[in-house]
Amino acid sequence: MTTDAQTNNKLLEVNHLSVDYFAANGTVHAVNDVSFTLQRGEILGLAGESGCGKSTLAYAVSRLLRPPAYITDGEVLYYPPRKEETVQKVAKRGAVKRVPGEPVDVLQLSAAQLRAFRWNEMSIVFQSAMNSLNPVLTIGTQIMDVLKTHRPEMGADGRKKRAIDLLNLVGIASDRLNSYPHELSGGMRQRAVIAIALALNPELIIMDEPTTALDVVVQREILQLISGLCREFSTALIFITHDLSLLLELADQIAIMYAGKMVEKAPSKDIYEHPRHPYSFGLLNSFPRLHGPLQKMVGIPGSPPDLRAVPSGCPFHPRCPLAFNPCSSVVPVLQPALAENPGQLVSCLLYDKRAREAAPPTMEEFTQRYGTLAEGSNA
Ligand SMILES: Nc1ncnc2c1ncn2[C@@H]1O[C@H](COP(=O)(O)OP(=O)(O)OP(=O)(O)O)[C@@H](O)[C@H]1O
């Protein structure tokens, strides 16, 4: 019998996830009712202005949040791996109790299950990860330590061979096994971190701005390396960055966040060719495009809201050049913008027939409305 999970190849299903920071000066609603799915081997890019909740969402999925952050609602369903080798590996270690085909709610795992889950099935590369390497241990030792802890059945020779293989995979010569982090360039340290993230063949890697400390040429090389390796091993990747242009090249799907909400999620190509949410359009037109016709950059007037007092209705409405009457009171839900393209999800009343009967806005209309708004703010 084929289950839905097998048919859909689903790896992760996040439902109605909300996270608050209970700060002294008020409650910050950093992630607000976010739902999305991730397929096996899929590269999902999370984009949005600073402070919109990207990192909080990623850390909530991996249960890495610490007080004052609290998950106030939702579930993070992880579908067990399909790979026979991984099924056996996890079953043998008894890390996560599971029924084949049934998902595990990551938010319900015990501390011990979570530790095994994080390394075996999910690994995380943090912001400025290259500085997280231990300065007094060689790169080889750091990779082999992970293997020693999580693959105790592997002998010393096996660990060394695997460490060399991993370094080669990320483009580092084997003789660097005995190098200390300070003996490597920034790009090489980042590659070493990626090697560690890949060490246990996880199903999912989460990367939070992993390359911001590097120059743009090295950033691009590293990102191409990551996406190539994820594709080679069918590893899913959630990738967080401010740089939407990088995501357009790298990701299969892009999710745009605004004020703790996911406002659009679609294949990169759809976002590039026709973003549907006015915020996605503004974000996309805030930087020059490398390909396609020349376009005037419009930018987004104003700034994101304080997440202790998120505007009612659609949180983007105070900045939106296409806002209309119900936007300040009705909360839009993430759903297909157009019936003929169910893969492009948008959270915007412009596409809700109950709120507006007119045809969805065209790209020209977006450009024109943003232009008018910019002229108004310059006046
Ligand atoms: N420890 C904390 N206490 C209170 N508020 C916090 C804390 N950490 C983060 N926040 C707030 O939560 C919101 C979301 O932050 P988060 O870091 O997830 O956003 P982000 O989109 O990843 O931003 P950036 O791109 O700058 O990393 C922001 O408004 C931030 O100020």
Image (cartoon, helix red, strand yellow):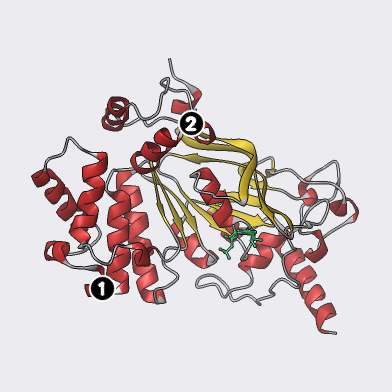
Q: Is residue 270 visible?
A: no
Q: Residue 183: x, y in percent? A: 22, 74
Which residue is disc 1 drawn over? 182
Where is residue 318, by image quadrant?
bottom right
Total labels: the figure holds 2
In the shown orientation, is residue 42 left or right of residue 325?
A: left
Amino acid type, label 1: His
Q: Is residue 87 visible?
A: yes
In the shown orientation, is residue 147 left or right of residue 39?
A: left
Judge the density around disc 1: few (<14), some (14-19), many (≥20) Cα neighbours within 10 Å. some
- Residues 322 and 126: in front is 126
Nearer-N-terminus badge (1/2) = 2
Which residue is found at the position 31% from the left and 59% from the top? 193
Amino acid type, label 2: Asn
In the shown orientation, is residue 308 left or right of residue 189?
A: right
Frontmost of labels 1 and 2 is 1
